[in-house]
Image (tube, grey):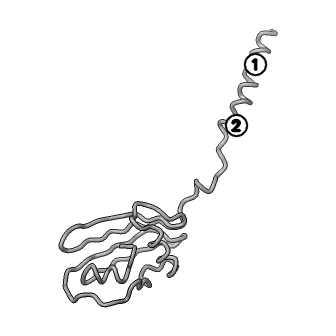
Amino acid sequence: MTLVLTAARGLAVLGLCATPFLAPLPATADDDEPGAELFITVRPASGGEYARTLTCDPDGGLHPRPVEACDALREVDGHVEDLDVDPGPCPMIWDPVTVDIAGHWHGEDISFHRQFSNSCVAERKLGPLV
């Protein structure tokens, strides 16, 4: 009987020791999702389509200039259609570029689709996003 009690106590202690490893870890700031996550697709009619992801807060993703792109979006509170980064002249050449941006900005869904007359016009409007 003593052997059974000793074995039972050993299993109980083992169970108590394992409990902290089985409990879920508390959430940390690293586990939080970014404040914004956007999927950007640029399709020039002449070819050379590309896509990139952008995360903001923290700034990153597979985007070549995430800090500049997120700063531009912060200035318009994520309203892509309100961007007008560099309102200057562009050549009047018809070489259409279609830009699609979808995702979320701090809890709000974003869906932007527009065809620009050429890449210069797209870059003047959307700046570092494209």
* Residue 46 appears left or right of 36: left
- Report which quarter residue 127 is drawn in: bottom left
Q: Residue at x 20, y 74 (%)?
A: 45
Say whether disc 2 or disc 1 marks the residue closer to the N-terminus: 1
Q: Residues within 10 Å of mark 2 (few under 14, many from 20)?
A: few
Q: Are marks 2 and 1 in contact (CB under 8 Å)?
A: no
Nearest the camera: 6 or 63?
Answer: 63
Indicate the position of residue 5 as horizontal and vertical percent values: 79, 15
- Report which quarter residue 86 is drawn in: bottom left
Indicate whether 104 appears above or below 1.
Answer: below
Residue 92 numbered tag: none
Indicate the position of residue 104 as horizontal and vertical percent values: 48, 69
Disc 1 element: helix
Q: Residue at x 41, y 74 (%)?
A: 111
Q: Residue at x 66, y 36 (%)?
A: 21
In which quadrant of the rendered image does the N terminus lie? Answer: top right
In which quadrant of the rendered image does the C terminus lie? Answer: bottom left
Disc 2 element: helix
- Report which quarter residue 24 is drawn in: top right
Indicate whether 128 appears above or below 85.
Answer: above
Indicate the position of residue 129 as horizontal and vertical percent values: 39, 73
Indicate whether 79 appears above or below 59.
Answer: below
Indicate the position of residue 124 as horizontal and vertical percent values: 35, 83
Nearest the camera: 44 or 21?
Answer: 44
* Residue 126 appears left or right of 25: left
**Amino acid type for the residue under numbered disc 2:** Pro
Name the residue that disc number 1 marks: 8
Indicate whether 93 appears above or below 24.
Answer: below
Q: Residue at x 47, y 80 (%)?
A: 79
Residue 20 numbered tag: 2
